[in-house]
Amino acid sequence: MDSGFALWLFAVSLGASALGGMLGMAGGVFIVPVLAIFGHVDIHVAIGASIVSVIACSCGGAASFLRGRLTNIRLAITLETATTLGALSGVFLFGVIPTSYLFFLFAAILLLSAQQMMARRGDLPGASTVADTERWTATLRLDSSYPEPTLGRDIAYHVQRLPIGMMLMFGAGLISALLGIGSGVLKIPAMDTALRLPIKVSSATSNFMIGVTAAASAGAYFMRGDIVTAVAGPVALGSVVGAVLGARILIRASNAGIRLLFVVVLVALAAEMLLQVCGIRFLKGSL
Amino acid sequence: MNRATPRCAPLERLLAGTLHYGTWLASAAIGLGLALALIDSRFSAAKLTILRDMRIATVGIALLILLPVVRVIVMLIAYLRQRDYHLSAIALLVLTIILLGFAVGLAGSKHRDTPGISDSGVRRNSSTSHDASYRLIPLATRHSLKVESCRSSSSVRGNSEFGRSQFAETAPRTTPMFAPQVAVRI
């Protein structure tokens, strides 16, 4: 085992997860490109390692959200049917899609994340007045409430437009399995715009769900032998530590500053990935 | 925090505890495994112990992957006991899909790992598996083996066969499902 490389992996995933944790997401979206570009790790191995780190981030962070009653576990398990199905489809595509397409897709997701980061996320006004609670939502009793410390009381919310939410979640699961990320980039619009959840609830519920989603694909990759302990081990450890650190820093650092840092890093990685594809194309003809 | 959340349901608390301690347990296993492997690669050249030590880390990763599965099982049991059959069915469906994922992965690897069957399976994703093994063989066993450059496809074949036979001597009979697939790549 190469100790230098293991330490580098540990440090990268620590940094990535800390950075991601500051905005309440897993660090996979940074880990995969950094490993693939700078570590010269095969992108499939990088994705396998990253999917394990997504589970680590989700499980490590879920406890505090659950105790704070922010996670809607009934909604989470319902949406997980769609995300795990998506993940399973991603597993089938994973071996078939050429590496250069994975780079392209990843660059697109990075740019989409950057764009989403620029548009500020907030609670949509007037959402809960509609109250056209659908049949499914009522049957499964998905509506709930969460404690809002600034008001000192619980706020009730309705879950809306479940079918659209489920479809977006299927896409999120697919991207998650394919690219080894938590794919908050698709879950966030699904939960904010389609289901109209309060921002704290959607962050907590999304964090709770990504673990199960990632487990569906990670299980397949693990059994298949795509998860390499020498890479995935240091990455998983670094992610756990980074996620804990990131959650601490979140409380102090200024939000606008983090956002800007995020956008810069995302765009830089996207550009680097596209260059990589083109460069390799020039040199080798194809990947 | 517990004082401020009087309605924090027992299920939520149970899940929080499971995930919290499960993450620590898995991380500890991975950390221990990696630390042992690092120490080993520094101070000795016994290749068998390297394989064994990487196995501890591999078990840690397996634990981490199984943690969300355990979480779904806990939810399934809880909903069954609450006689909430809608959500029980949903939890069961999620569990089935995840286990299907494990089965798909197992089916994808089976023909590669069965001893005696030659390398036809290694070609599964020929363009990618080359690089993976290229990257990893020097990583895992740099100090104990003289690994020749294995960029070309012919030597990759040789190396993966080597990995398999290496492992066949040390493979634990108790965990036939987990260890072999990983060892092939290492």
Image (cartoon, coloured by chain):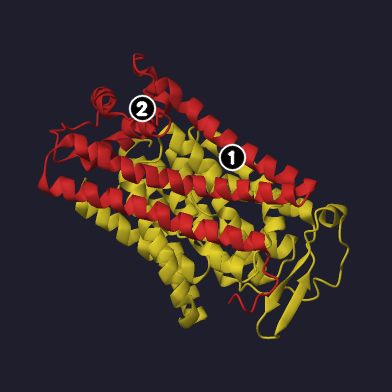
Chain colours: A yellow, B red
Other-residue count near label 1 (Cα within 10 Å), few / some / many at <14 / 14–19 / ≥20: many
Helix, strand or loop under label 1 = helix
Helix, strand or loop under label 2 = loop
Q: CA distance from mark 2 to mark 1?
A: 25 Å
Q: Is label 2 or label 1 in front?
A: 2
**Residue under label 2:** B173
Residue drawn at x 82%, y 56% is A137
Q: Closest to the observer: A189 or B46?
A: B46
Chain ID, mark 1: B
* Residue A264 in view (yes/no): no
Q: Which of disc 1 and disc 2 is earlier in sequence?
A: 1
Residue B65 is left or right of residue A76, and the answer is: left
**Residue under label 1:** B98
Other-residue count near label 2 (Cα within 10 Å), few / some / many at <14 / 14–19 / ≥20: few
Residue drawn at x 41%, y 54% is B25
The dot on residue B148 is none
Tell me residue A179's x, y (percent): 49, 47
Three-letter amino acid code of the residue under disc 2: Arg
Three-letter amino acid code of the residue under disc 1: Ile
Tell me residue B173's x, y (percent): 36, 27
Residue drawn at x 63%, y 62% is B12
Tell me residue A106's x, y (percent): 48, 51
Same chain assignment for discs 2 and 1? yes
Chain ID, mark 2: B
